[in-house]
Image (cartoon, helix red, strand yellow):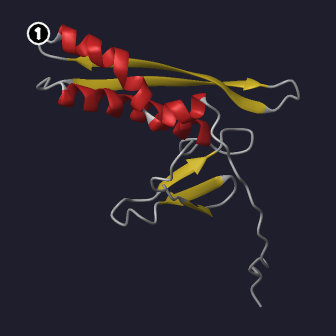
Amino acid sequence: MSTPHGTASVRLEPAGGYKFTASFPSLSDVAPIHLDEGPPLGEASAPSPGALLAAAIGGCLAASFTFCLHKSRVQGGQVSADVEARIVRNDEGRLRVGGVSVVLTVAAPDGEDGKVERCASLYEDFCIVTESVRHGVPVDVRIETRQARSTSAG
């Protein structure tokens, strides 16, 4: 059973072709980011949605590990992540994220190996993005229509 605990809101607006600008209404000081599909649809001028999914997974895992290091009082511990999302075609020929590989690199002072190993055994369960993706988070989609703005000069 799950208990509601907040939301993460994103607004996407068209920016030409297959490009979109994503803004974060609840984070007024955060600059919008751009998304673009790769060829043949887009120009790969910005991260793709698949790359942002990979970044979300890697960022969440790195943050969870960092949190554990801080709670364990590992001074100066740092975590970086290299993430690869594998794009595959399903049986119908449609592109999907077929899997994600993450390598976390943990830099910690000498003598902290035990704490790092303990964090390695705990941190994944606290990563909301990775665990949600692993368990197939439900996605509800609703289509609303409106009249398109006229682009003709009269």
Residue 54 visible in the displayed image: no
Residue under label 1, please give it. 110
Q: Which of 31 and 135 is in front in this view?
A: 135
| Residue at figure coordinates x 54%, y 42% from the top left | 47
Which quadrant of the figure has residue 14?
bottom right
Q: Image quarter for residue 97?
A: top right
Residue 7 vs residue 13, the one in the foreground: 7
- Residue at point 78%, 25% (across, down): 89
Image location of residue 82, percent across then percent down: 42, 23
Rendered image quadrant of residue 144: bottom right
Left/right placement of residue 92 relative to residue 133 reads right
Give the residue type at disc 1: Asp
**Residue 92 in the figure: left or right of residue 61:** right
- Quadrant showing the C terminus: bottom right
Q: Position of residue 28 (x, y in %)?
A: 37, 67
**Residue 56: percent from the left, percent from the top?**
47, 38
